[in-house]
Image (cartoon, rainbow, N blue to C red):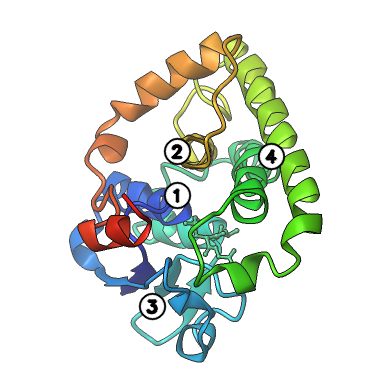
Amino acid sequence: MKIFDCPGAPNPARIRIVLAAKGLDSSVEFVKVDLIGAEHKRSEYLEKNPLGTLPALQLDDGTYLAECTAITEYLDNLDGNPILTGKTPKEKGVIHMMQKRAESELIDAVGIYFHHATPGLGDDLRPYKSPEWTDRSVWGNKQRDKALQGMKYFDQVLKSTPFVAGQQFSMADITVFAGLMFADVAGIEIPETCVTLKAWRATVAELPSVKNRSGQNFDAEDLRRLGF
Ligand code: GTS
């Protein structure tokens, strides 16, 4: 299998955590796609994933899977022992519900804010993300408020359960964790009042699959291109 992704990027990090949790790191070849250079918007990559997003997983038979939820379902069920997407119908239902909320209320909102209301990843990607820069920044800023509301929502959820979808760490936690990573990059601070969310984040950061996932940072060349 091959994973097309970019080390250090938030959505790709979701799958790197899954791979670590499932002990599958050595079963995949990581292929770096130049996110800053907008390589994921060129035809060669669009043939793999027409939506032009990272990550994408290429199976050994040539099938491409995009969308972290779908990739996670696939990888988690490969060995017949799902640990991140639920075993029972109820677990699966609750995990998928919270996973969707983690996307719509947090990571996707942060992503829209980052790409439409801030300089984002710079000049090469801008034509694909923010062609109408000024108008869209208003919309982008609303997504920042949405992400902050999302953080408050998950803070409330975590007051009654140790993890986002209940008693066990799941793909919903991975998505919230990656959403907060993305928020750091975008400059959206977790509200002071979200004490429970911050404590949960510290706990999750220490889980072996999260702590030991591969490729946690952009490489030096990427950082130079971003002006660091
Ligand atoms: N819903 C998608 C998924 O689950 O895979 C989101 C993927 C996504 O937005 N990936 C980002 C991307 O490719 C990369 S990153 O922002 O997480 O680093 N964005 C390009 C685009 O055009 O949205």
The residue tagged 3 is: 59
Camera-side residue of 81 and 4: 4
Q: Determine contact: label 3, label 4, CB under 8 Å.
A: no
Separation of residues labelled 3 and 4 (CA atoms): 28 Å
**Disc 3 vs disc 4: which is toward the camera?**
4
* Towards the viewer: 134 or 38: 134
**In front: label 1 or label 3:** 1
Q: Amino acid at mark 3?
A: Leu
Cα–Cα span, label 1 and label 4:
17 Å
> Horizontally, is 142 left or right of 101 in the view?
right
Label 1 residue near ligand 1, CB within 8 Å:
yes
**In which of the image's four quarters is ligand 1 placed?**
bottom right
Query: Of the residues tagged 2 and 4, which is closer to the observer?
Result: 2
Mark 1: which amino acid? Pro
**Tag 1 residue:** 10
* Residue 83 picture location, percent across and down: 41, 42
Q: Which residue is mark 2?
A: 181
Residue marked by disc 4: 101
| Callout 2–callout 1 Cβ contact below 8 Å | yes
> Circle 2 — which element?
helix
Q: Which label sits in the foreground, 1 or 4?
A: 1
Contact flag, marks 1 and 4 (Cβ < 8 Å): no
